[in-house]
Amino acid sequence: MRTILYLIRKEFLQIFRNKFIGRAIFGVPIIQMLILVPAVTFEMKNISLCIVDKDMTPESRGLISRLDGSTFFHYRYTTFSESQARQLMNANKCTLVLEIPRGFGKDTGNGIPGRIMASINAINSSTAQLTWAYLNGVLRDYNADIIRQNPGSLSGQPVPIIQVTNRYWYNEKLVYSHYMVPGILGILVTAIGFILAGLNMVREKEIGTIEQINVTPVRKYQFIISKMAPFLIIGLIDLALGMVLGKLFFKVPFEGSVALLFLCSTIFLIAILGFALFISTFAGTQQQFMFIAFFCMIIFILMSGIFTPLESMPGWAQRVDLVNPVAYIMRINRMVILKGSTISDISRDIWSLVAIAVSFTFFAVKRYRKTA
Amino acid sequence: MTGQSVISVSNLVKKFGSFVANDNLSFEVYEGEIFGFLGANGAGKTTTIRILSGLSEPTSGKVVVAGFDAKKEPEKIKKNIGYMCQKFSLYEDLTVKENITLYGGIYGMSKNLIRERTAMLLEKLSFQAWGDRLISSLPLGFKQKLAFSIAILHEPRIVYLDEPTGGVDPITRRQFWEMIYETAARGITVFVTTHYMDEAEYCDRVSIMNEGRIVALDTPEGLKKSYNASSIEEVFVKIARPK
Amino acid sequence: MKRFLGFVKKEFLHIFRDYRTLIILFGIPAAQIMIFGYVVSNDLKDAGVAFLDLSRDEVTQKLTDKICSSGFFRLTETLTSYNDIDKILKKGKTKAVIVFQKDFGRDLFAEGKTTMSVIADGSEPNMATLVTNYITAITTDFNIEQARAPGGAVSLISAQVRMFYNPSLQGHYMFVPGVITLIMILICALMTSVTITREKEFGTMEVLLVSPLRPTQIILGKVTPYFILSFINVIVILLLSWFVFGLPVKGSLVLLLAESMLYILMSLSLGILISTVSSTMQQAIFISMVGMMLPTILLSGFIYPIENMPWIYNWVSAIMPPRYFIIIIKDIMIKGTGFAYIWKETLILAFMTMVFIWLSIRNFRIRLH
């Protein structure tokens, strides 16, 4: 035990001896969190709209002002030429082109369905779908008004309508920052621990100091633990700092148990560090480690479910995610912080995370050879 | 000079694939002696030293160091040895004192003992003013002497020195050899590899290695006599380029 | 010049000698494009929903069937009381609970309208928005079907939609260009900054500096092989996205390749700049990975459209080079537009490249003096 403490002390000394790294491990996560969190939102606003109004009747103008009045659309251009509208879209000046054909107003008054034509820039398929949904929402309201205004011209009895009201629990206004604070913190802590722990190990190999350690009676597990412990501690401090700032700046509610969150984070960090040290045994130079780390990190992060929903991934990818510690911690963070889930709600995730942490660490100790 | 045997090697073979680095070595090293291990670059010296210190496993043969089998109990050997290798290996980004404390801690020395030995060591090397300097800022000669001192900090039974004086100026080399004598006088066996032939004259016994085999082993005087040479250098030339 | 070519050749050999580096250099971008082309997607599929049906009549049954058979949703559980909602949402597998009030069907026909409520898990805002939008859309469809059934056309406005550039709404159109942009800048900046810092850390830079080569030549010599490798990499990725994802280059291939060269050059000069401020490889890697990865993912428009961000981010993201390359690559590859549409972005990238180089030279001079 005393041996481990001496080794850990040495790691801390080395980490903080590099002035840049010593500051960056705390500064970078905080600054990035503060800058990046407010940027992220899927909420659509100001969808830039271009209108091709070939009708020019009170009805068509009514529809346009209706669209302009909605919070989603921002009426930017009006033109009479389709090719000009097309050019505007090519130049990224508008996302939605709405063409109102001649005769629209006449038809609407006469019980013939008035048809309009929407062209949406669909390179980003999900925002295209949302744009389409919002457009339909505005049209639905407009329709309802027509029905109310001209009851006589519409056939038969009123159509029974099911209305949908949405409520969002745990985050009523769908504030993105509440979701992103734990997410971005999780990613930064992962990146820092993963890269620095692994690089530290490979660096000792590359410089040759590991030889000097291998020739001493230090046990394998002692050395591995001493490489993990500093980054575990730093990671937890980063997390605590980040949560406090998140609460101050972004008013992230904290529903669940702090102790549970830190328990899970500890298990998670052990998993990540174990994995980093396991990988480091395959790399001879820091360059090689960095590439392997880059590969794994990007996969871990983009597949973690924070940027795109896990459910949207194909089945095989969801199975791969069973060993992705980042996917677990993202889910756990969200559940504990925002929903106040208790240990029994997330027990399955916790046990999976424990299994991952234990096996990665086991492999790291196993693969690390004192004797060749 | 006929103490107890602390290293006993018989029929040691080490292969890397089809390359034979150590070809059937057998020798004994006795307690308290300075054992010189000579050979050209690539003769297999470093391989042997790595096996003797438990860093590398022998392919076949029996190696017993400080009473422990190198194949079965390498970790027990490690408790009884010190090691300083040619590729210089103190932590460059730690200070002199921090390095000493680290290795003291690894060998389970108490806090007080570490403090005591650190003071002693710095004084002996007249390093007092350098205690808080980073290793990276020290001249090479100082680093080598410090590395040696740290290798024997825990009073091991044997210390291995792999080309300890490589790239060092003649004055420092002299001081280094004084340290080696002192160490041996304290009863620590010194196992040293070198390719400076003049240094071989300072050893109690010398073995000469060529292409993975030990071709000669005797006291410096004995070697010179049997090869009819005036210096070890001459002996070496005669062995390396026979006829 | 001859001396310089010899040096470049040496650097090339350096890279090729280590097959691990080479595998990593080509394998990683290719693998990542493959993985993310398939994996990263925003399309809703099999999202878990639960029902709390307090009415249990024909209408609720029909609507439930319609929602569950849409392919977007998967029934996780049928609840019997309000108290279960919190419990099941807390477990995380269920993204929303759909509640039908008592006498849902009767109210619908008696009063002409009724309300169903969707309680979505707001702790995942994307998911919550997607789920409620889809459910609303399905219900609207349902209303229209029901209205048509008994007879009598309803004269309303309806819109037809054309999805431009990506008629079948595939996720690849958005993610392939994004992944190319992300990976190229990170890999280029990493490789150059690390390879130069390595020489500094191990003291071999000084050996090079006393050689007859000029400092610029040394840096160029180190960077040229990576420039060529990255360019080959771009071609590999483009071929993959064509053959695997059916994403051909609609516009001018020559223009796209030229723009890629500019982007690679920009990334490499960013790498050089990083190397001038780093003293150890760890530091260079920290800056180019921890420092750059998240801002690149989040502020470039890769996943989150810049238009939706608070206005100030329009300026913050203006300093992110990937933002411009994403526009360029989407315009050429997917829209098929020409240089007239992207000259501004091109100029900005060129300007950034020059700034990075100028700053590197300045830092390097300071260091030498």
Image (cartoon, rainbow, N blue to C red):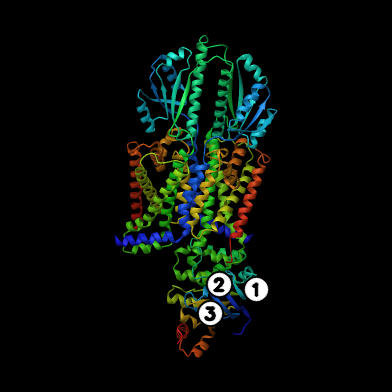
Residue sitting at x 44%, y 72%: B167
Is residue B135 visible in the rendered image? The answer is: yes
Where residue C181 sits in the image (x, y, percent)?
43, 44
Residue annotated with mark 1: B68
Q: Could you tell me which quadrant the C terminus of chain B lies in? A: bottom left
Q: Does residue C164 appear left or right of residue A265 in this picture?
A: left
Picture quadrant where residue B9 is located: bottom right
Taking depth in this image into account, of A73 and A223 the one nearest to the observer is A73
- Comparing marks 1 and 2, which lies closer to the viewer? 2
Q: How many marks?
A: 3
Q: Earlier in the sequence, mark 3 or mark 2?
A: 2
- Chain under disc 2: B
- Chain under disc 1: B
Residue annotated with mark 2: B15
Give the Cα separation between the discs numbered 3 and 2.
13 Å
Q: Give the amino acid at mark 1.
A: Phe
C175 over A229 or under it: above or below: above
Q: Mark number for residue B213? A: 3
Give the Cα separation between the discs numbered 1 and 2.
22 Å
